[in-house]
Amino acid sequence: MNLNNKTIAIIGLGYVGLPLAVEFGKTRSVIGFDINKKRIAELRAGEDHTLEVTPDDLKTAVKLSYTDDIDVLRTASVFIVTVPTPIDQANRPDLTPLLKASETVGKVLKKGDIVIYESTVYPGCTEEDCVPILEKHSGLKFNVDFFCGYSPERINPGDKVNTLTKIKKITSGSTPEAADAVNELYKSIITAGTHKASSLKVAEAAKVIENTQRDLNIALVNELSVLFDRLNIDTIEVLEAAGTKWNFLPFRPGMVGGHCIGVDPYYLTHKAEEVGYHPQIIASGRRMNDNMARYAARSVIKLMLRNGIDVARSTVGVMGITFKEDCPDIRNSKVVDLIKEFRNWGVRVVVADPYADAEEVKAEYGVELNTMDDLSSVDSLVVAVGHKVYRNMPLDQLKQMLKSDKPVLADLKALYDRHQAAKMGLTVFRF
């Protein structure tokens, strides 16, 4: 099975699919497919609103074309699916994008083709959920007429150091020959090398536990931060002291959102319960992390009440709504939970973010984005995201934005010197 001269189709051109399409498109024929016509038009114009790829990067992908026409996919022999795998409101896996993408691929699948999935799923999803759809819509037989691979994405949105080619890639295939072919395909672009897993399930499980492990580590320090707050101990100072030991893991407390860490553990617990096992530690960590936005808002409200601020008539400024710093990605942003909790207490909330798209935020969360000037006269301030522009803001500039005599500054990313802030008359809260 030789994929060297085969045309590749990338299904889904978001944070994962586009960098992959660009990298392959530098040397071989690639079709970038997305159902979002606006996204296709944007990429054809040489722009990427996710900021994962620069206009110059797009120009280097000389063999990459973009389309929303399914018929164009018929010329491809390798299909790489990179669509989102979110959760629903009940925290259950929502496979709709993945299954729709499989249906699309199934309609154009030919004998000898290979379908590789990069979307994060639970162990067994490719063979149990996706393959039957591929077979149904193609009329072909799995591992006889077509083959599958699984190579989990490891894109870190906004990270300009650990980029696609510099992160080791897990690969796998539905047969030994398919596994070799998939591995060789990715080796052609991944300079950091590859790790060939023994099966699709092993590769799927490896991906989902990467983020589950991080989720649990963050849950531990979040629980410690709640405890240390009651003991009147600064959590960050404790972690910095403990971090002087060589094998202490440098996790920090905070709100856990985004499309990976805040989502993937639910895929694992879903599969665990499906086979009759009810995970305790994973579920406990999720509950801890999901509660941190509410905990932060209520902590700020308590301090405001203590400082004599009329909470029901107050205005709180929130700086940042993306799920991480210096990145426009708003998927599963826990800042939204923070805003909701403030509003439940009657607080007027004014939100600003230099990276987020105002139309997208409004459509997704019903939150109006404002400018920093609109935060110039608030009772308290929450710095929710560690954008570089916020890190570089002097404390006296923040102080000028606050109108209360005893304002609260919630420095959720520990960007500022809390002792200096206290000297300036700010009541500081941080995890």
Image: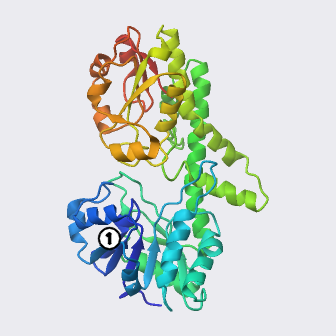
* Residue 212 placement (x, y as % from top left): 59, 52
* Number of other residues with Cα within 10 Å of mark 1, as a class: few under 14, some 14 to 19, many 20 or more: many
What residue type is disc 1 on?
Glu
**Residue at x 50% of width, y 16% of height:** 312
Residue 264, compared with residue 33, is above or below; it is above
Front residue of this view, candidates 203 and 239: 203
Q: Position of residue 146 (x, y in %)?
A: 54, 87
Left or right? Give the position of 224 relative to 356.
right
- Above or below for 140 versus 314: below
**Residue drawn 45% across and 30% down?**
412
Quarter assignment of residue 396: top left
**Residue drawn at (39%, 16%) of the image:** 379
**57 vs 335: above or below:** below
Image x and y of residue 195, in percent: 50, 71
> Pointer 1: what residue?
23
Q: Kindly state the secondary structure of the residue where label 1 is placed.
A: helix
Query: Total number of numbered labels?
Result: 1
Q: Is residue 135 visible?
A: yes
The quarter holding residue 162 reads bottom left
Residue 327 visible (yes or no): no
Coloring scheme of the render? rainbow
**Closer-to-camera residue (245/182):** 182
- Determine the image quadrant of residue 369: top left
- Residue 24 placement (x, y as % from top left): 33, 74
